[in-house]
Amino acid sequence: MRILARMDDNICTISVDTSGELLHRRGFKEAVVKAPMRENLAALFLRQCGYTGREPVYDPMCGSGTFVIEAAEMAAGLFPGRSRRFAFELLAGFDAEAWEKIRAVPPLPIASVTFSGSDRDAGAVRASQANARRAGVEAVTAFEQKSVADITPPEGPPGLVIVNPPYGGRIGNLKALYGVYHALGQSLRERFSGWRVGLITSEDKLARATRLPFGAPSRPVDHGGIKVRLYQVRIGG
Ligand SMILES: C[S@@+](CC[C@H](N)C(=O)[O-])C[C@H]1O[C@@H](n2cnc3c(N)ncnc32)[C@H](O)[C@@H]1O
């Protein structure tokens, strides 16, 4: 167990770390690609987009599948972190039986809603499929290899496109990325009428390169040392 003592202005606060491993580690994302989104941030951005688990979700740059898997888990009422261990399991008063009962809650049926992702990188598609399998949401998720220039909406009613394209600071160089953001914006404007879009990026000018009429971005959120913001818009409305 990790016990922490914090000294501030003559006051000592003692606390016990009941989490252990970092909380964004849900236990299923063994396969990762470059610059993965943290699961707890993915959940935050989905919630900020008003996602309640009752509409389709599509990520056209899915990387290791974080948004798609997180959305499917939320829709199925699957508890985050259900397949990992927590430090509180080591506490003397830990009730293993009660904890097992909580963890064993069966998933809710998901009626005709799809959770899908695509990526131009074949390795990313394989990683997403493997992660979805480990998370137990394979049956309601679908991934395919595709560039953003070629994306089309999944069949069914419109829903939420959520995407974090590469940012200049982490992968790719900024100039080369303008074309990628532009192609993404063009595909969304032309083919995704009725869909809501949530785009996460660190660069305002990259968001503007999509030519999507975003409202004011969210407050910045720290993502691995980079400040990112959520940009939102509804296509065709
Ligand atoms: C920042 S990562 C996304 C990370 C993802 N959200 C995750 O949690 O793993 C950006 C992804 O965009 C993909 N990408 C870059 N250019 C693309 C393009 N033109 N079309 C489709 N995917 C592209 C990359 O292969 C990479 O997986």
Image (cartoon, rainbow, N blue to C red):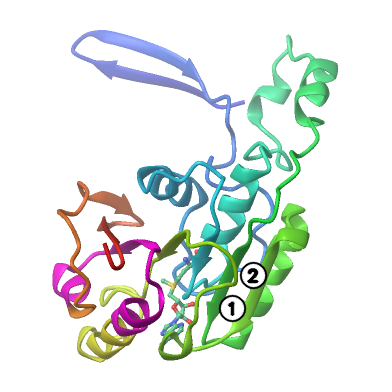
Residue occupying image coordinates x 48% and y 62%: 158
Give the labeled residue for mark 1. Answer: 124
Q: In the image, which residues are magenta? A: 184-208
* Magenta residue check for 197: yes
Asked which quadrant contains residue 226, the reply is bottom left
Q: What secondary structure is marked by label 1?
A: helix
Looking at mark 2, is its residue's CB closer than 8 Å to ligand 1?
Answer: yes
The furthest residue to the right: 97
Mark number for residue 128?
2
Quarter in which the C terminus is drawn: bottom left
Q: What secondary structure is marked by label 2?
A: helix
In the shown orientation, is residue 227 left or right of residue 53? left
* Magenta residue check for 211: no
CA distance for labels 1 and 2: 6 Å
Quarter in which the N terminus is drawn: top right
Q: Label 2 near label 1: C-beta < 8 Å?
A: yes
Residue 206, given in percent of the width and then of the height, sits at 20, 75
Residue 157, given in percent of the width and then of the height, sits at 53, 62
